[in-house]
Image: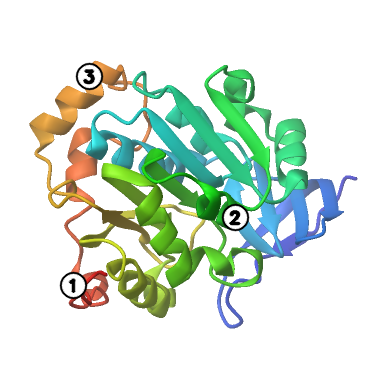
Amino acid sequence: MTTDAWVNETLYPDWGQRFRIKRELARVRSPYQDIAIIESHTHGRVMLLDGVVQITEADEFVYQEMLTHVPLLAHGAAARVLIIGAGDGGVLRRVLMHPTVAHAVMVEIDGEVIRLAREFLPTIGGDAWDDRRAEVIVGDGIDHVARAADGAYDVIIVDSTDPIGVGEVLFTDAFYAHAARVLGPGGLIVNQCGVPFMQAEELRETSRRRARAFPYVGAYVAAVPTYVGGFMTLGFAARQPGLHALTVDTVRARAAAAGLLGRTEYWTPEVHVAAFHLPPYIARHLPVAEPHR
């Protein structure tokens, strides 16, 4: 359908962004959420879930690269990676860029997100869907983590919506406790924690919850244009202290061994290290952690 209408994002009641639509490509009501894919005049194709922008072709590389390359290079030798959500396939594609990865499991609760992304956003997932190392499961990521064996994974990447609706259970104490259990000794988990200029409570609360299960909890930032409100924060929780504090030389050496240098559009070794140096307005929302149990 060709149109000259606008779509207004519904994340915040009093402030937001809108896109002028070239055409609407798909609109589906799944058992979990309303899914819309539009073609915009400025950002290529855009996926919205329940009226909230999830990904655009123009700037998806920022979020996807930082959500993926930072934890995998921080670990340094991740062979088993669990991705929860990320039904567009962009995180899976970038996980598989790392030659240490032998098995990447992606668990997405909404099969319609996968179907529509493969049909209308094919460049984002690319050929990752058919990689022999990839296992794509349409199912409940919470249940998958609860049932997984101790030490089953090296890295967990959670690409979820905000802690409302279908994404809410990915921010609970029980989820983080299971995540800590299924990670190996050097394991770590990352997940989006919102835009703290507008969603400070999300960062504060998830940091407290992660600290009950992990000995190190922090955050790093990425500037994603369509996640309006300034820096997006990505929560970082590890079983081994120090993984957030690598030097540029160490990160560059690991990236070179992985063949990543020159293949990214936002992530670099310098950006990786700098992303953990938070401006005060964000850092103040990381209180002293409660002792982990």
Tell me, for residue 289, which label it has, or none. Answer: none
SS class, disc 1: helix
Q: Quadrant of residue 78?
A: top left
* Kind of residue sitting beneath label 2: Asp
SS class, disc 2: helix
Residue farthest along the right direction in this orientation: 1
* Kind of residue sitting beneath label 3: Ala
Is residue 38 something one can see in this rendering?
no
Q: CA distance from mark 1 to mark 2?
A: 37 Å
Answer with mark 3 or mark 2, whichever residue precedes in sequence: 2
Residue 53, above or below 96: below
Q: Quadrant of the C terminus?
A: bottom left
Q: Position of residue 253 (x, y in %)?
A: 15, 23
Question: At 43% from the left edge and 71% from the top edge, which residue is drawn?
Answer: 173
Q: CA distance from mark 3 to mark 1?
A: 32 Å
Tell me, for residue 256, which label it has, or none. Answer: 3
Residue position for label 1: 280
